[in-house]
Image: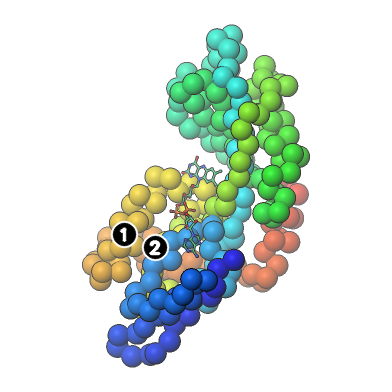
Amino acid sequence: MYDPLHDSCPGPQQQHHLTTPAGTIRCAKVIIASNGYSAQNLHPSVQGRTLPVLSSVVVTRPLTPIELATIKLTSQRLVMDTRALKYYFRLLPDQRLLFGGRGAITGKDADKPRYREHLLAALADTFSCLRGIQAEYFWSGWVSVALDDYPRIYSPSPGVFTSMGYCGAGVTFTQLAGQRVAQLAMGAELPALPFYQSALPRFPFARFRRLGQRLYYYVHR
Ligand SMILES: Cc1cc2nc3c(=O)[nH]c(=O)nc-3n(C[C@H](O)[C@H](O)[C@H](O)COP(=O)(O)OP(=O)(O)OC[C@H]3O[C@@H](n4cnc5c(N)ncnc54)[C@H](O)[C@@H]3O)c2cc1C
C-alpha cells in the first residue's frame, strides 16, 4: 500500500527520501504518525515493533426509556471491562448504545457479518435485556498494539521520530503524544518519564505475530 521510506546520505544533516506513488520528498526530519495503519516495510527501525489489530464497533438503534431504565447506564462516559480481550461501550447522545471490542484478525475479514454478530452476542451477554437488538452501524479500524501494552514517543533512528503503540487507548493520549513528538523533533527536552526513554520492544518471531494473535484470541475468548 505504501512505498518504503528509506534513509540515505549519511552526514551531519542526514537526508531522508520518502518515496510515494506521486513522487519523492527529501527532508531532514521525518515523523511517523501512521500508528496502526503503518505498513510493515515503512521503515526498518519500527518494523516488527507493533502489531496492527482491528477494533470493531456496533451501534444500536436509540434505546427506549424502558431499556434505558433497565440497563442503568446513566452517564455517557466510556466504560471498558477488564478482560484480556476487552469490550467497551458508551451511551451516545441520541440514546443509542455503542459497543466495541476486538474484531477480525485480518483486514479482508473485517466486514464479515460474523464479527458484527460476535459483538452483538457480547452486548447481549453484558445487557441481557438487549438480547436480539440489531446493529444499525458497524465499522472497524486498526489500532497499534505494543508488546508490553505501553506506548512510546521516541526517535528510532537519526532524524526519524515516532509515537505509537497506544493499544486502542489513544484518543486522549495522542493529544499529548502529538505535542511531545513535535518537541522531540525540534530538539526540546522532554519530561523524564519512561514514555520517552526507550524504544518500543520488538516482537519476538515478528513474522509469526498473526499466528500468535490467533492463539491468544482462541485462548482468551
Ligand atoms: C474502532 C476503533 C475504536 C476505538 N476506540 C477508542 C476509544 O474508545 N478510546 C480510545 O482512547 N481509543 C480508541 N481507539 C484508538 C484510537 O483511535 C487510536 O489510538 C488513535 O486514533 C491513534 O491516533 P494516531 O493519530 O496516532 O493514529 P490514527 O488515528 O490511527 O491515524 C493514523 C493516520 O495515518 C494515516 N496514514 C497511514 N499511513 C500513511 C502514509 N503512508 N502516509 C500518510 N498517512 C498515512 C492514516 O490514514 C490515518 O489517518 C479506537 C480505534 C478504533 C479503530
Residue 73 in view of the camera: no
Instruction: Give the color scheme: rainbow, by chain, secondary structure or one colour.
Output: rainbow
Instruction: Please tell me whether residue 35 is drawn above or below residue 156 in the rendered image.
Output: above
Disc 1 residue type (three-letter):
Arg
- Lateral position of residue 11 relative to residue 99, left or right: left
Identity of the residue furthest to the front in this view: 22
The reply to whether the C-beta atoms of the residues labelled 2 and 1 are less than 8 Å apart is yes
**Residue in the foreground of this view, choosing between 162 and 191:** 162
Q: Residues within 10 Å of mark 1 (few under 14, many from 20)?
A: many
Q: Which label sits on residue 180? A: 1
The quadrant holding residue 106 is bottom right
Instruction: Please tell me whether residue 132 is drawn above or below residue 122 in the rendered image.
Output: above
Disc 2 residue type (three-letter):
Ile
- Lateral position of residue 187 relative to residue 210, left or right: left
Q: For the residue with label 1, is its CB less than 8 Å from the closest atom of ligand 1?
A: no
Marker count (numbered): 2
Instruction: Please tell me whether residue 196 is drawn above or below residue 221 in the rendered image.
Output: below
Percent across and percent down for residue 91 are: 51, 25
Percent across and percent down for residue 61 are: 60, 22
Q: Which residue is mark 2?
A: 153
- Lateral position of residue 26 relative to residue 103, left or right: left
Residue at (55, 10) in percent of width and height: 65
Residue at (59, 30) in percent of width and height: 59
Dot 1: element: helix
Residue 44 in view of the camera: yes
Label 2 vs label 1: CA separation? Answer: 7 Å
Percent across and percent down for residue 35 are: 49, 59
- Lateral position of residue 79 relative to residue 114, left or right: left
Residue at (38, 71) in percent of width and height: 30
